[in-house]
Amino acid sequence: MVFLFGSLYRLTRAGFVLARAGVFSDVDPAILPPAARLPLAMAKLVARRTGRPGLSNLPAAISALGPSYVKLGQFLATRPDVVGADVVRHLELLQDRMAPFPREIAIATIEAAFGRPLAEVFVSLGEPVAAASIAQVHKGRVKDETGERDVAVKVLRPGVERRFRRDLGDMYFAARLAERWIDDIRRLKPVEVIDTMARSVKMEMDFRLEAAAASEFAENAAADQDFRIPKIDWDRTAKEVLTLEWVDGVPLSDISALAAKGYDLPDLGRIVIQSFLRHAMRDGFFHADMHQGNLFVDSEGRLTAVDFGIMGRLGFNERRFLAEILYGFIKRDYRRVAEVHFEAGYVPRIHKVEDFAQAIRAIGEPIHARTADQISMAKLLTLLFEITGLFDMKTRTELVLLQKTMVVVEGVGRTLDPKLNMWATAEPVVRAWIEQNLGPIGKLQDAGRAAQTLGRFASQLPSALLRAENVLTQIEDMAEGGLELSDNALSRMGEAAARGARLGHIALWIIAGAALLLLLR
């Protein structure tokens, strides 16, 4: 019960902060279910009159709620299917920047993680150079058999796990309450949304997993001449501490410094786009947070990525889907783009390929009518997912993450070269993948994969048949004996339903009371 009251108070406070910022001021009550209209009216009463659109205050309001809500906002920015395109545009402005914690606390965390004094782990450790919601980064120096070298040391923020655990508990409570009481929200599966975010945050807070992601990413990109990943120092990496090679380079956010050093900015834009597409399609494993602050140009002119807490994966079918739709749009083969959606099973067979191809043409033709520097592949994918929604295509989270990353990557490329030709830049990478995987060599590889699948199925067939026989026997036994519910069981079910309804009403009254107390403060 204490947890219930604590969650209700914190959620009410969060709602009040958002309402006070005017976030809900522009919401039309007509589109909401009846149960949500009274809270909306209360939210509009307490909103400050700033003279600006309500959603423009959303990033600042979420930042004021703390790191857990910043992460939630950043996560929801990848789910336009849940919050809508307008909200996503404002959530994308969220910056995960926090005040640094003292160096002494970082030292204590490092010493606890390795069970040794700092001097036995690092030669030196400087003040923090960057701080975010989960961790902060220090410049350090280490010494081993190869000599001394500079390293970047990422240290987990103290108390962050406990804070996230508490706030995620509140979010779960709100999601379950919404699913129980608001039918229209149930279809958005808010509990599943929080589940996905919780798994992502859990992985981000274990730096051994980030180190493993960076190591895998580095292996995939080892042969890339113009892209590299800093080396991981596994001896100085633990759950709470990540140590990797220090990058002496110019961040892509500093355009004037890049120009002053004589770098070819349009060529850098090309490298950013082609590297992302190569990793997504060739490897099926891509950096999903490729903003300018995470990209540097090193002393040898190579693009260098850092921060591997958020990575995306694509299976072979998703990569084929991406390659074929991009190539189809490049070649204006809208029929093929439509067929790929059906072949992947993304669009139900109740729809006609011809109708879907016609809808896709409505996206492609206006794009081809523009000059090369006005074409946006990210916008194309956004429009494509909007169209597919009309044809009952369910949200594919891996494709949404890909699309959101492409928005960021394309923005970086355009910053470096405002006249960047996206089609010409993407075409060699996409064509090479199609030739390798969908040409004659690809057909042989497909045949090999099919043979392996058939072999596995054949080896598992006897046990599968035995399990099927057992299930059929159990069903027959139930059919013969019948399925009965005693009066006692029915009574208990009724009591449980009534108890759930009472708790829901009590929760709503508590929320209203807490909101009133906040207003009177």
Image (cartoon, grey):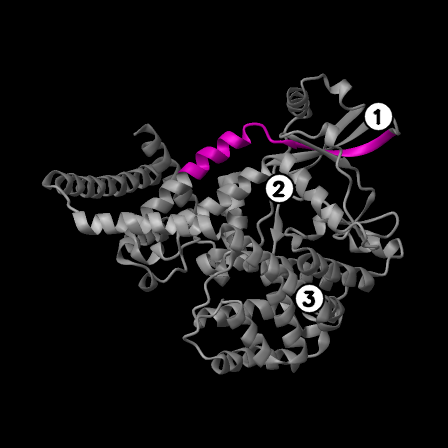
Q: Are marks 3 and 1 in contact (CB under 8 Å)?
A: no
CA separation, marks 3 and 1? 50 Å
Residue 486 tag number: none
- Left or right side of 438 for 178: left
Residue drawn at 58 percent across, 75 percent down: 337
Closer to the eye: label 2 or 1: 1
Residue drawn at 65 percent across, 58 percent down: 408
Q: Nearer the viewer, residue 90 or 447?
A: 447
In the rendered image, the quadrant that contains the C terminus is top left
- Left or right side of 47 for 148: right
Q: Which residue is mark 3?
A: 444
Give percent across and percent down for residue 312. Answer: 61, 52
Q: Which residue is mark 2?
A: 97
Q: Nearer the viewer, residue 246 or 208?
A: 208
Q: Which residue is mark 1?
A: 143
- Left or right side of 443 for 299: right
Q: Is residue 18 above or below residue 136?
A: below
For the record, the magenta segment spans: 148-169
**Amino acid at pointer 3:** Leu
